[in-house]
Structures are given as structure tokens and as C-alpha cells.
Image (tube, helix red, strand yellow):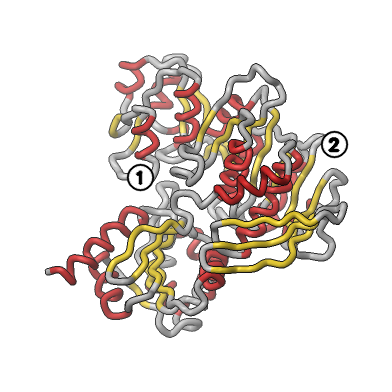
Amino acid sequence: MTALAVICAERGYQITGSDVNEVFQTDEILAKIRLQPLLGFSADNIIQHRPDAVIFTGAHGGSANIEVKTAQSLGIPVYSQAEALGMFMSGYRQLSVCGCHGKTTTTAMLAVILTTTGVPVSYSIGCGMVCGLGVPGHATNKNNLKQWFIAEADEYVTDVAAADHTPRFMWQKPEILLVTNVDWDHPDVYKNLTSVKSVFQRFAETVPIAGKIIINADDPNSDLLKKYHHRISVGLHKSADFQIRAIIYTTGLTRFNLITPQDQIISLALHVPGRHNVQNAAMAAVAANLAGVDWSDIKRGLLLFCGTKRRFEFLRQVRGIDFYDDYAHHPAEIKATISGIRLWYPKRRIITVFQPHTYSRTISLLGDFAQAFGQVTVPVIMEIYASARESDQHTISSKILTDQLLRYNKYACFAASDQAVVRILRQNTRKGDLVIFMGAGDIFRRGQEIINLYQSTYES
């Protein structure tokens, strides 16, 4: 929604909006476009402002929200965020980035690469500030029909409240489709991996034969996309059209070669850790080249990208301990993030403070979560952050999750409060450690508060 708000502001629209009274990572961006959300939701917000259109997100009741209902009763056009983004992308050449993991980072990489070339490009990224880019949304004018619009494409459903299970990415019409990977997520709407695969296949089928589908050659769940003749594969696997070779990890920098189908060797480097980000960067590089960017410009653009808000984001150092924040909330993301950090910092101890996100995801992927923290020195598990779309059925808890973790990591512990986290950190941290707050809930805010509490215990 924030990226879309930026796009609307740049197009000259007057914007109002309503939100909950909660600090969030995108507040800084809204302040930049001078948008102060109204606190809470009420019919009066629509009646008083009489907007020309209302765009709603899936959160806060979706189409069942009182402001949406009021707008409909007044005959004001109403659009979901996914539908509205598709409308704004209309008329551009579209490059969509989908996948269950890595799509935000990959979209941001692409936006940085194309922006640094000086070529006009529009983009919508589902994150806070992007290092090397700034705000996560931008819209050029459409005087040149060859201009690209790069967008993160989400597989979640359009509107749970209205039982509109159209995958959100189906509102986009990509000429180039990049699929980072396929995995089972959102168990509240997708009952198994097969159902997730089917929606990705539906999206791939919308790409014209003259277009391109870029797939991950190392992801077995992406095999269903290999049947398309206009697909290009990227990865370490020997069958990949573009092959990743000679990966070298050093502190703060990862280097690798990309071998083209013509056996050209492209040397690339990036300032974000992990093999998963090598894969993301390689796929972004191929997509950028297909969009008309020279390899030399791609190399320069990747070096300028140094991450997005909440993706292994450095917070600060306290008493020789480095504190980071990360959005990882799925077992595959947790494992990828931790293994990536291990490649950069093989000798440093890693302590994670994980806030599980949604009851449905926690119970459906319980076994995978239990094994995801194997490389962590001390995993700390906080209470589950519930989605507004679900309620606690008392079938899962963070205590149950911690008990499962203990089967694979004997140092796993449960923390029922911020103060409990601080006590555990006091008992287990030492100079040189990395502490990473992880999750998709309010952990980004609480992490800062925990650091403050941790620091104050030494100063008091």
C-alpha cells in the first residue's frame, strides 16, 4: 500500500488514508510524501473526504472494512490493492517478480539496476526504504510505451473477506516473469504445495510466447514451469541456461560468475549475504539484461544495492554485540538467512529472537520450523504474532514450538515477554556475537525496545 501511495503522489493525486495506531517500518516513507494517516476506521472518513476512489488492503477486514462498505453505499469506485496496482501498471511493459521467498529483494535489485542506468523505470516493492534506491515506489509518465514497470507480484489471494481467491499477481500482465521459487506458504488459503503450484502455473500461462519466464534451476518445485518453451533457467544446476559458478564469500561481499548460454563469463558482486541472494542476484541480472540493460551496467547496479529495510538490516552495536533485524518468517527463509550469515561470519556466534507469524503457518510448518534453527547458537522464541485474519484455536503455541526446537537445538528457549528476552540475552551474549530479530509481526519495533532495555540494564 505504501509503494502505491508513493506512486499516486508522484502522479499528482491527492491522497488520504486510514490505518491502525501502530508504528510501522513504512511510516518514514509516508512522512516523505506528507501523508499522515487517519487513525482508525470509520464511515465519517469517507463521508467527509468524498474520495474519487477507494483502494483497500487485505488487512483490517479487506472489503468488509466499514470505509469500503461506506464507499460502496455512496457509489464510490472501490479497488483492492492488487487490482489497483495492475491498473497503474497498464500501458507499461511489465516485469513481474513472484515467488514464495526472495521476491522483495529481487524486485529491489532490479529496480536499483535499471534506475542506475538512467533509463526511466517505474516500480512497486513491498518493503520500507531500499538502500541505493530510496522509497519503494515510483511512477514515470507513459510518454514512451517502451518503459518498464517492475513490480513485486504476490501469490496471496485478493480478498479473503469477499471470498475472492484470485491470486493477487493475476492482476498483472507481465512480458517478463521472474519466479524466484515455489514453496508452500499461506496455509490459511492454500491447503498444500500442490495448490500453490497450480496458481504459479496459472500466472506463468499468462505470459505471451514472445515474452520470457525466468525460473530457478535449483528449485525442484519450479520444475512444473520447465515445460514452457519461452522459459529461461538460472542456477548452479548443470542444466541451467545461465549457470552460477565460482561463488566466493568474504566479509561484507559475495562474488560469483554468471555463464551465459553463449559461454560469456559475467563477473558479478553484491553486498548482501547468502547463496539465496546469489540466486536472487543472478535472476535479477538475467531479467535486467532481457529488459535491455548491458552487463556492465548490471554489474555496477548490483554493487550499489545493499539491501532493503528488514532484510538483514543492521540496527546498532551494544557492548560489542551487533544487533540486526530480518523479515524471515518461513522456515526456508530462516534457514537461508542464517546459512548466508554463516558464510560471511563463520566464526561468530548467532543468537536469534524469533517471533512466529500466524497460528496457521506455525502449526502447518511446525516440523520445518523446529529444524530451521540448527546453525543458531541460541534460538529464542517469542509469543506468536497473530494475523487479524485468524483466531487462536489453542492447537499451537510458542511453548509447543520451543519444545520441538529442543529436539534439534538444546539451547532453544521460550521468552514470554520483552523482559524475558533481555534476561536471556544477558545470560547468553558476549562480545562479538550477532543477535538477529526475526519475524513478520511487530518484532521490528519490539526489537528496538529490547535493545534499549538490554543496554539500560548495564547502565543502571
Tally of marks? 2
Residue at x 28% of width, y 63% of height: 451
Is 338 in front, or is 393?
338
Q: Position of residue 310 (x, y in %)?
A: 44, 53
| Position of residue 83 in the picture relative to residue 421 (left or right) | right
48 to 147, vertically: above or below: above
Q: Position of residue 36 (x, y in %)?
A: 31, 30
**N-term-proximal mark, 1 vs 2:** 1
Mark carried by residue 304: none
Q: Secondary structure at mark 2?
A: loop
| Residue 429 quadrant | bottom left
Mark carried by residue 24: 1
Is 163 in front, or is 36?
36
Is 63 in front, or is 376?
376
The amino acid sitting under disc 1 is: Phe
Q: Position of residue 168 (x, y in %)?
A: 60, 39
Cα gap from disc 1 to disc 2, whole angstroms: 41 Å
Mark 2: give few (<14), some (14-19) or many (20+) Cα within 10 Å.
Answer: few
Q: Is residue 416 visible in this depiction of the protein?
A: yes
Q: Quadrant of the C terminus?
A: bottom left
Q: Secondary structure at mark 1?
A: loop
Q: Position of residue 213 (x, y in %)?
A: 77, 44
| Residue 406 quadrant | bottom left
Mark carried by residue 209: 2
146 to 306, vertically: above or below: above
Q: Is residue 403 visible in this depiction of the protein?
A: no
